[in-house]
Amino acid sequence: KMLDVCLLGTSGMLPLPGRWLTSLLLRYNGSSMLIDCGEGTQIAIKEKGWSFHPIDVICFTHYHADHISGLPGLLLTIGNSDRTEPVTLIGPKGLSRVVSALRVIAPELPYELRFIELSESREHISINGYEIDAFKVNHAVTCYGYAVNIPRIGKFDVEKAKALEIPQKAWNRLQHGSTVELDGRVYTPDMVMGAPRKGLKVTYCTDSRPVKSISENAQGSDLFICEGMYGEKGKESKAREYKHMTFVEAAHLAREAQVKEMWLTHFSPSLVRPADYVAGIQKIFPNVQAGTDGKTVELGFED
């Protein structure tokens, strides 16, 4: 099983030719999860060649137009893909009100929408194999980052199962975490399962000042996708005023969080060639790249 990660769009505020608004799509075990849905998101999905039907979860960082204005069209397209199963939407308080307003232009959907509204500074949601930590960040409006974990159970110990004379027909269920009763004996998973192994973790954060909650929640991520609104020098006061982040600030967060890799995203329209400014922050955090539309990675579990 792999976790596929695709950065669909990397633009902030305004879509540009070849650069759609910020959005991220994850695929794991047949279930897709989208974070943010700015204008052009469904075109970006189409360009990538990924499918609309398996999108089970859509998370929103906040309700500025460049992060949610693509939603009505996307919901209609998901409906046209013959989906009838519910879609779960997650976002800050006010989500159902915002979505209802947008749905004036998409009133008929063949599936149900379910809403999870966030109000605490940190909330945990388990859905479709994704373990999601939503955490409050610091923007002009209420805004959340998302750390997505795919946990991995321990190894099944065949020798132990044989030594304890556990019947083979119980093995599969024990491996999947069930307690099994056979011939008057009770077998529990901990009798045959090793310690949990390292899972996978992707953290996505955009539209915020650098705050401690980001480095805490991104801790140890395999991939950290972070806002880099400004790469050029001299934009620090602008970043502070509009509650955004510079490349330098993002690099410090990545270093603090000890992530394996960072992709920058949500570039200002004035930042025409983000990649030109990456070398300047590699001394702070070496494994960093400027995100590009359609940038994809397949994350696999360690052996």
Image (spheres, rainbow, N blue to C red):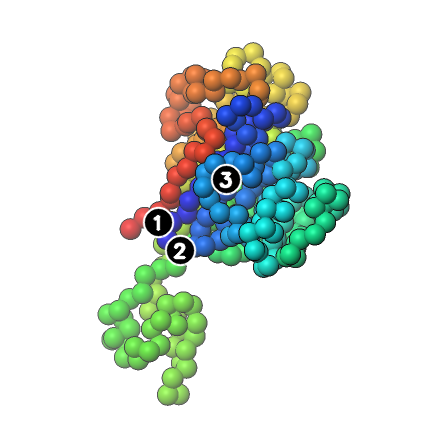
2 or 3: mark nearer the eye: 3
Q: Give left or right: position of 127 versus 298.
A: right
Q: Amino acid at mark 2?
A: Arg
Relative height, residue 283 to residue 97 (above, below)? above
Q: Say which label, 1 or 2, has the lower sequence index.
A: 2
Marks 2 and 3, how far apart in space? 31 Å
Kindly indicate the quadrant of the structure image that contains residue 60: top right
Whole-number angstrom distance, CA of label 1 to CA of label 2: 8 Å
Instruction: In the rendered view, tell whether residue 129 sits above or below residue 245.
Output: below
Q: Position of residue 160 (x, y in %)?
A: 27, 71
Mark 1 in CB contact with mark 2 (< 8 angstroms): yes
Q: At x 62% / y 26%, what residue is drawn?
A: 13
Residues marked 3 and 1 touching at CB (< 8 Å): no
Q: Tag 1: Cα neighbours inside 10 Å, few (<14), some, or many (≥20)?
A: some
Residue corresponding to mark 2: 152
* Residue named by callout 1: 301
Determine the secondary structure under disc 2.
strand
Dividing the picture into quadrants, the one containing residue 210 is: top right
Percent coordinates x, y for residue 245 in the rendering: 57, 25
Q: Given this view, does label 3 or label 1 mark the residue nearer the observer?
A: 3
Residue at numbered disc 3 = 46
